[in-house]
Amino acid sequence: MSQADKLFCAMCEDIIENGTTTEGQKVRPHWEDGTPAYTIKQFCVVNRYDLRREFPALTLRRTALKSAMDEVLWIYQRKSNNINDLNSHIWDEWADETGSIGKAYGYQIGQKSHYPEGDFDQMDRVLYDLEHTPFSRRIMTNTYVFADLSEMHLYPCAYSVTYNVTQTPGDDRLTLNMLLNQRSQDILAANNWNVCQYAILLMMVAQSVGMIPGELVHVIADAHIYDRHVDIIRELISRPQYSAPRVSLNPEVTNFYDFTTDDLIVEGYEHGPQVKNIPIAV
């Protein structure tokens, strides 16, 4: 059975059984009918996924891995904040008439700063440091920039990525690990989507710098299940679980900026039926 399934089910059960509710509190999100969207939440959930063992895709239902990869490329490769550069429609609600989501996500990754070695944006600096000083403890990206929050149409949810390199004694190869910090997460709608996105990002970066993808550690400050999602979650986590799919990248691509969704290879993905018509709080 998939380790991602086990972690997801345990997390959901813990939130439902032991979480706290926001019912009756002043909350920002609302349902389409105007009703406040309350949640059951846990503070600071931490999940660890070891990509050396398996790819962390849920098998309880299918995660659209190529679409997840496309959004990661939109942010970290294309460095875009315009939905016209994205192949899915998940950001449409937050875009203005030009397609912009404001100074968010890819906009922040593309901001340049001057260093003695030259001018770098956030992603270019990550790649440079992993090549030249892989054991640095300063290799990270951050999109939660206070000065620009008022010009973002939505504050970043998954906002900070820290890269950390380890080496097993006796092994010449370096292992690249990732810490993903997320301020808030809708567990049903977004949990495995984000996990798979950043697992793919870790794989792409590792391949670009000649390393092995290792652990993805996901820290969620506010891990919540919306009130109208509880029954859906209960049904989802009761489903059969299957072995994790085999997910790899085209080995011929060694430049981060050359990856496309065609380079994602997914094999043996057995999964349950998709959950349809999930209500989304805005």
Image (cartoon, helix red, strand yellow):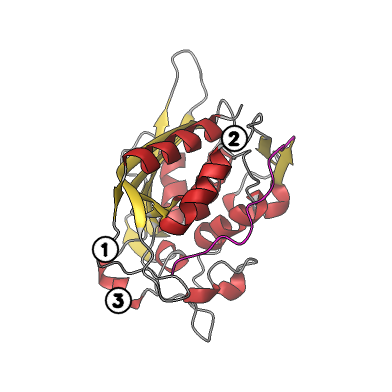
Residue denoted by label 2: 55
Relative placement, left or right, of 211 versus 246 is left
Q: Which residues are magenta?
A: 268-282
First in sequence: mark 3 or mark 2?
Answer: 2
Q: Nearer the viewer, mark 1 or mark 3?
A: 1
Residue drawn at x 39%, y 43% as measured from the top left: 16
Q: CA distance from mark 3 to mark 2?
A: 37 Å
Quarter placement of the N terminus:
top right
Q: Callout 1 environment at 10 Å: few (<14), some (14 to 19), or many (20+)?
A: few
Quarter placement of the C terminus:
bottom left
User: Residue 3 appears at what percent x and percent y?
Assistant: 54, 29
First in sequence: mark 1 or mark 2?
Answer: 1
Residue drawn at x 45%, y 66% as measured from the top left: 281
Asked whether residue 272 is drawn in magenta, I would say: yes
Q: CA distance from mark 1 to mark 2?
A: 39 Å
Asked whether residue 224 is drawn in magenta, I would say: no
Instruction: Identify which amino acid the numbered label 1 is placed on.
Output: Gly
Residue drawn at x 59%, y 54% as measured from the top left: 68
Q: Residue furthest bottom?
A: 97
The answer to whether residue 178 shows anywhere in this view is no
User: Residue 267 appears at what percent x and percent y?
Assistant: 74, 37
Q: Nearer the viewer, residue 240 or 242?
A: 240
User: Residue 51 appears at what percent x and percent y?
Assistant: 54, 31
**Could you say which quadrant of the image residue 110 lies in?**
bottom left
User: Residue 269 appears at what percent x and percent y?
Assistant: 71, 38
Instruction: Identify which amino acid the numbered label 2 is placed on.
Output: Phe
Q: Nearer the viewer, residue 48 or 188?
A: 188
Q: Which mark is residue 24?
A: 1
Judge whether 212 appears above or below 139 on screen.
above
Residue denoted by label 3: 150
